[in-house]
Image (spheres, rainbow, N blue to C red):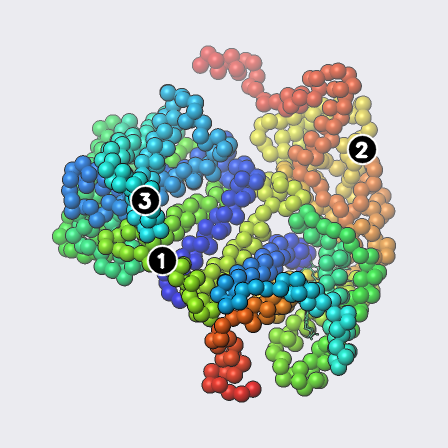
Amino acid sequence: MISNWREWTKTILWGVVLAGGAAAVMRFAFGLGVTTGLDDATPWGLWIALKLGFVALSGGGFTLAALVYVFRLESYRPLVRRAILLALLGYGSFIVSLIFDLGLPWHIYMPILHWQHHSVMFEIAWCVVLYFSVLVLEFSPVVLEHPFFQNAVLQKALHLLHKTTPVWVIAGIVLSTLHQSSLGALFLMAPHRVHPLWYSAWIPVQFFISAISAGVMFLLLEVYLAERWFNNEARLDLMQKLAQIGKFTLGLYLIMRVGDLLWRGVLPSALDGSWQSVLFAAEILLGGVLPIVLLSLPAIRQHKETLITSAALVVGGVLSQRMALSMFTLWRPAEQPYTPALAEVLIAFAIPAAAALLYLFAMENLAVREGSTQAPRIHEALSHPQWGAYQDHSLWGVITQRSLLAVFVVALAVVLLPNQNNAMATLPKQPVQAGRGWEKLILDGNRASYQVNFAHAEHQERLDCQVCHHLNIPQDDASGCWQCHSDFSQPTTIFEHGLHQRTLQGNASCENCHAGAHNRHTAIDCQECHASTEQGERVSTFTLEAPGYVQAMHGVCLECHQRESQARGRADLAVCSTCHFIPQPAPEGQARLNQE
Amino acid sequence: MDLWLALAKGVFLRFVLAVTILGLLRHVALSLAALWVAIRRAPAQSLDLRQIFGETLAWLFPIRRLHRNRFGYSLASFLFHVGVLFTSLFLVNHIDILRDQFGIGWYAIPKGILDLLAVVTIIAGSSLLLFRIYASSSRQLSQLSDYGLLVLILGIFWSGFLAGRPGNPIPYAWLMLFHTLSGAALLLVIPYSKIAHCVLFPLIRLGSAVGWRLAPLAGGKVVQRLHGPEGRQI
Ligand code: HEM
Ligand code: HEM
């Protein structure tokens, strides 16, 4: 059974990963529109912000590689492997989260085949692919050293890798520099959407320098936490060195950031007390100025706890910059705010949790830490001669406990899965707006302005009322569509069993509506009692769930329009624009707009 | 009340059914894995799978084995199981709800037959309960959960049966709420109580066949369990 906080940590991480896995199934089964809060106004949301964060925290990889292999600062060597591991996981997370974000994830290889030289995305795609490959090469010696891979061919490969290390390292430094800054360059292409306090023509450079700072500080945190995990003492001298680099680059980044805002005269007017300016001030003061001040005090530098506190502030500040820039403060129309959907959040937590589990696996089984050795735990457990001992073994306990966890987490996900009746049911509830008008009925159920001007009077002349008014609310004679199809996309129940039962004197009344057995198939139709309700064909009460508005309207109109367009050979009768149009300003208004 | 009913037939039910099914699958997977590891370690590794399968089947349909000395109990137990399985799996109302929630459904046995079966089950279940209370050997071996589960199942059957009777004095919605919540409670505990036997039963023969093959010492835990840590005789 799980006996210590390490196992508990892993179990919780597994829980998060499993929950995300269930959300991932939804994401790929039902698509982005249904499972995320993203839309045309906010095509970039939580996942993008997260991606920028992953890449920023990977900055330690190229920094340490440069320090050791280019500048030959041997004292940093004990940190190289773990820095590269962090970068590998950071970039891996980037790629995984990209797969979630792409509408057609199976097209992810496209930029490699189809070159769009002018696209920043093209540069980013290539940098990610190449740098990730380089990271794999840089890290593979650590894997190949494991006893499991002791065979001649692999050892040859290992030797070759060792000999060519400088080539990979330099390639890695160049590529990641390019990538860090090109991610920033993305935001130069939409200057009007970036909030003035985060905008700068220097964003690419800011991204690059702050990635060094955040990456190094994250490494500092990792060193401290990992050594605690393994009941070891982190080396204070190494932590201090990292803090020094982090402080210096952070200072540089802050000067660039604030200096540029001052130089362009943006700062005074933008600090207007809005929540954005408060966020900005917190980011600069708490995540920038404060840690610099702290790290300048010798007393702070002497203690690991204060060092990691400062490091955490820096990491928080840089993450805040990435997330504020790409998500919180990015401009979007006021009437279309963005809130991440549940599936989005679950996946956003699951990716770093999975990375953390991989990290722990690597740390426990490979020689990543200075002087660490590995124990082949699984084999030991399986070959234990005594059955009882095997059952008591922690591995068995872990398997039973984790699978129990999996049962409950997946069951929770099943609760979230959309109702089989209708995948639309996962869409948020959206009450339908009533139509307006009479002769010309303006229908715009969700007020999105893709409206239909329904020629009511003209249809009335040609058709029976009940083609559309097929069911009425009791005592009404032409209920509007939206009265029953009251949600834009979700089906709604329109029969209240409890209400009927209460009004008809409880159990004694069952037989009023049910003939014989008591279930929905034996229920009588509405108009047996409510004479005025139904005008068209009879609809059985118990199965009566009114489809969503869109489905209902398309159902009635399209069927007839398609039939007529076939019959009369008029293709224009059954295309979207036959009914839908986007209202334009009146001609004179349009002319005035053009002039202006 | 209507809301609670809708929840109990909706999200609660989805969760509970998922826990039941996944939980039972987990038991099967873990047991098979444990058996596999065990047999790999046993000195004699061959198993007569055909014989094991045959014996399992024979115990599953205890037609010829209704014990002579406890005929009444065995008969009640058999009828009780037939009743539980058929009413819970083949009742129109249940299948309708499944269709709503998961889009799957299957053949339903006519409600009239199941009404009768429900009565039979209630009688059989009550006999099992009485037997447990009055037979001293059973009473001594019983735990609280043995009574609890029977009472729970009887409650589910009473409420389900009464809900289908128009004119009974208890309001329909109350009965249904009781029925769905206690039904959900039963489903939830199925994998985590002795009722897990509904999937583990077929593994019992296999498990014993493997168990005999293990080296001595392997049963240390069993002996400890039976005799207590101090080696007390039972
Ligand atoms: C947890 C979810 C459950 C739901 C939502 C549910 C729902 C229902 C419904 C709607 C009825 C019909 C009542 C009527 O006639 O109006 C019913 C009857 C019944 N249910 Fe359930 N049930 C559930 C679980 C169970 C379980 C687990 C069992 C058995 C172990 C069970 C056994 C019965 C029986 C015996 C009847 C009466 C059949 C008859 O008299 O013909 N139910 N249930
Ligand atoms: C195919 C599946 C099942 C098989 C093969 C099976 C088999 C058995 C067997 C062999 C016994 C011992 C009876 C005896 O001593 O004569 C038993 C007892 C019992 N079973 Fe099942 N069972 C199954 C499914 C279920 C289900 C689905 C439930 C409940 C929802 C259930 C509830 C019980 C209970 C409550 C007892 C104890 C009866 C008592 O108190 O004496 N079983 N079962």
Does ligand 2 reach within 8 Å of label 1's beta carbon? Answer: no
Distance, label 3 to label 2, CA atoms, is 82 Å
Relative side of B18 to B160, left or right:
left
Looking at the picture, do discs 3 and 2 lie on one chain?
A: yes
Q: Percent x, y for residue A565?
A: 74, 19
Q: Amino acid at mark 1?
A: Pro
Q: Chain of mark 2?
A: A
Q: Which mark is residue A466?
A: 2
Q: Chain of mark 3?
A: A
The residue lying toward the viewer, choosing from A455 and B165, is: B165
Q: Regarding mark 1 in the picture, which secondary structure is present there?
A: loop
Q: Regarding mark 2 in the picture, which secondary structure is present there?
A: helix
Give above or below for B93 relative to A348: below
Which residue is labeled 3 in the image? A152
**Going 66% across and 49% down the picture, which residue do you hit?**
B102
The residue lying toward the viewer, choosing from A192 and B48, is: B48
Looking at the picture, do discs 3 and 1 lie on one chain?
A: yes
Give above or below for B22 relative to A167: below
Q: Earlier in the sequence, mark 3 or mark 1?
A: 3
Q: Amino acid at mark 3?
A: Ala
Question: Could you tell me which quadrant the N terminus of chain A lies in?
Answer: bottom left
Q: Amino acid at mark 2?
A: Gln
Q: Regarding mark 3 in the picture, which secondary structure is present there?
A: helix
Q: Tags 2 and 1 in contact by the CB under 8 Å rule? A: no
Which residue is labeled 1 in the image? A376
